[in-house]
Structure formats: C-alpha cells, structure tokens
Image: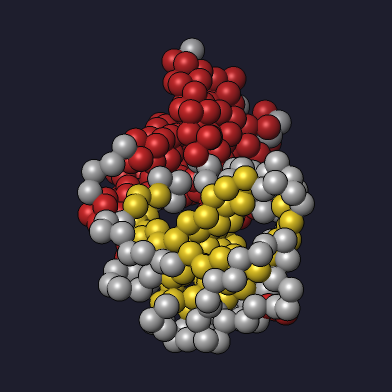
Amino acid sequence: MNTIRAGLAVLAVCVLAAPVAGHVPSFPEDNTTPERALQVPDAVKSWSFYDRLDRGQVRYYQFSLDAGERLRVGTFTPQSGAFAPSLVVMSPASNATDTVPAGLTVPEGMGRVVVAGERPERASYEPFAPSANYHTADVDHPVESDRTYLVAVYEASNRSGQVGVTVGYAEQFSPTEYVTVPFDLVQVRLWSGQHPLVLLAPWLLTLVAGVAFVRRRRRQDWDTPVVRGALVVAGLLILGSAVSTTAQTALALSKTGPTAGALVTAAFVVVPLVCGTWILGTAVRGDPPSAGRIRVGLTIAAVATLATWAGFVVAPAALLVLALLPRRTLRSGTDGNQR
C-alpha cells in the first residue's frame, strides 16, 4: 500500500509539471536564403530552433497563421558578450518599409518590420531543460487575417554566435517528438557550448556510485540474473537523469541567480530520484518482481519517468516490460532460491 501511495504522489508531481513541457526542439540546416527558409509546419505549436549565425549571415524561417491566432517569434542566445540577434518580420500583407541591413533579402511584394535585438542585463532561466539564455528580440501580437510570414534572423554588428529562434505558443508534442526529447537535449547542451565531459560527468558519477552500492548491498542469494540486472540498469539510468538535471540546474542558476522557475525543474529531479532509488532498492533487496505491489510500483515508475524524460526512454520501457511479463517468465529470470 505504501508503494501505491508513494507512486500516486509521484504521478501527482508529474501532472503539475506537465504544463511546462516547453518548446519542441529542432535543428535547422542551410536556411540561409528566402528560397531555403525553414518551413515551420505549425506556427501555433511552440518550437525552439537551435541555429547559428556566422559573420554577416542571415537565417530565414517561413510559416502561415490564420486569423485569430497569434504571431509569436523570438530570439535568444546562450553565450555571454555583446552578441544580440535581431529579427525582420516580412509578409505580403504588410505595408511597412523598415530599412533592413545589407545582405538581408526581402522578396518582392513583402513589407517588413525590423525588431532590433537588445542585450538583457541578465540571462533568463529555462525550467523545462534547465539552462540560462539571453533573450534579445520578441514579437507577440494577434493575427487579424490569414497571413504568410517570412522571418529573417541576423546580428546588426555582424557578430557570429549560437542563436535560438522560438516560434509559437501552444505546448504540444507528437509521440515521436516526445520520446526523442532526452536525446535532443544532449544536442542542445552541446549546441550551447557545454563541454562533453561536463555533460557526461553526472552520468559517470552515478554509474560508479551505483555499482559500488549494488555490490555492497545486494543479497548474496542472487547472482545478478536477467531481471535483477535489468532493474539495476534501469534504476541507474533514471538516477543518472536526476543527477544530470541537478547539475544542469546548478550551472544555469549560477548565471541567472535564484528564480522561481527552479521549483518547476525540481519535479524533473524529484520524480526520477524517488523512482530510481525505489527501483535500485527493489533490485538489491531481492524483492520478487512478480509480486502485485512490485508490478504496480514498476508501472507507476515507468509512467512517471517517461513523463519527466528520465532514463532516455529505455529505462521506462524496460520497467513497463517487467511489469507486464508473465509470472512464470519473471521467476525464470531469478535464481533458484527464489523459485
């Protein structure tokens, strides 16, 4: 009963964290002319495009919006310094004729509005994927009639650097986008300039500490059979997610200072921490995986860790498989003393 109650509490935390799922990450390539503009499939859906501006370069994005929707576009950068990406919003329905910088192409028949980038004093905290970014330009207003937009991103002083472009406002994920988020976040952190060793360190520390814990505490009457081994691996992957998120949060807060957004991120630490600890404890104690309460616990942990992107999808999937396996199969994966 305690397992079920704790599991329900974990699921409640996941429900509270769901509204801040954040932007769908994407990584454009070769969108350096209006003809090669990245086609945003749904500009209402919230996207983050992780791009780069080389010296004097312009990046283009194209999309359509219907009357009653909102035009919402912004730019940000993870790097310190004077780099401040700007926007030009173009549309055939616009009559604006703002002066654009040399090298930026305005297709014939399109009006244009320049939104100059301004460097904020302090970075902003991103709670969904804990990070610190400098937001430099933003457009947000209702669309009065069906329109097509072409957005150009540039840097007024021709500086080079990493630039992120946000489009849309409705937080929606397709099933494929959802399950690939943990892998995309690795790419996002590398994009931001994080050294691979900094990215890997929390996982290595978790692995070393976890293996030492299992070797010291495991029952002597089981010799790491398949089922127990699967629980150990899943538990370590999930705990690694908690440790990694904690480290990324600390790095981000060192740049932004304390912020209420960190309380949102806490859900992505607490849930995998609780689930991973319980899974690892279940494995080292030798609790029978076929027991009803253990099956319920594994199911809840699988759902909760999938909801918080812990364990790179692999661990939640393994937990769900173990929860659904027939009793005979689970018994065959344990040693003879437990049959």
Whether residue 262 is visible to the viewer of this picture, yes or no, is yes
Q: Is residue 164 above or below residue 101?
A: above
Whether residue 334 is visible to the viewer of this picture, yes or no, is no
Residue 163, given in percent of the width and then of the height, sits at 46, 69
Q: Quadrant of residue 92?
A: bottom right
Residue 42, given in percent of the width and then of the height, sits at 71, 53
Who is closer to the viewer here, 56 or 39?
A: 56
From the image, which quarter does the C terminus lie in?
A: top right
Describe residue 158's horizontal placement relative to residue 73 as left or right: left
Who is closer to the viewer here, 288 or 38?
A: 38
Determine the residue positioned at 44% across, 51% down. 129
Who is closer to the viewer here, 117 or 27?
A: 117
Describe residue 1's horizontal placement relative to residue 205 as left or right: right
Residue 239, given in percent of the width and then of the height, sits at 40, 45
Residue 286, given in percent of the width and then of the height, sits at 45, 32
Determine the residue positioned at 62% across, 32% down. 323
Q: Is residue 55 above or below residue 227?
A: below
Q: Count the marks: how many?
A: 0
Determine the residue positioned at 52% across, 55% down. 139
Describe residue 67's horizontal placement relative to residue 82 as left or right: right
Who is closer to the viewer here, 45 or 194?
A: 45
Q: Is residue 287 above or below residue 87?
A: above
User: How is the rendered protein coloured?
Assistant: secondary structure
Determine the residue positioned at 52% across, 63% down. 165
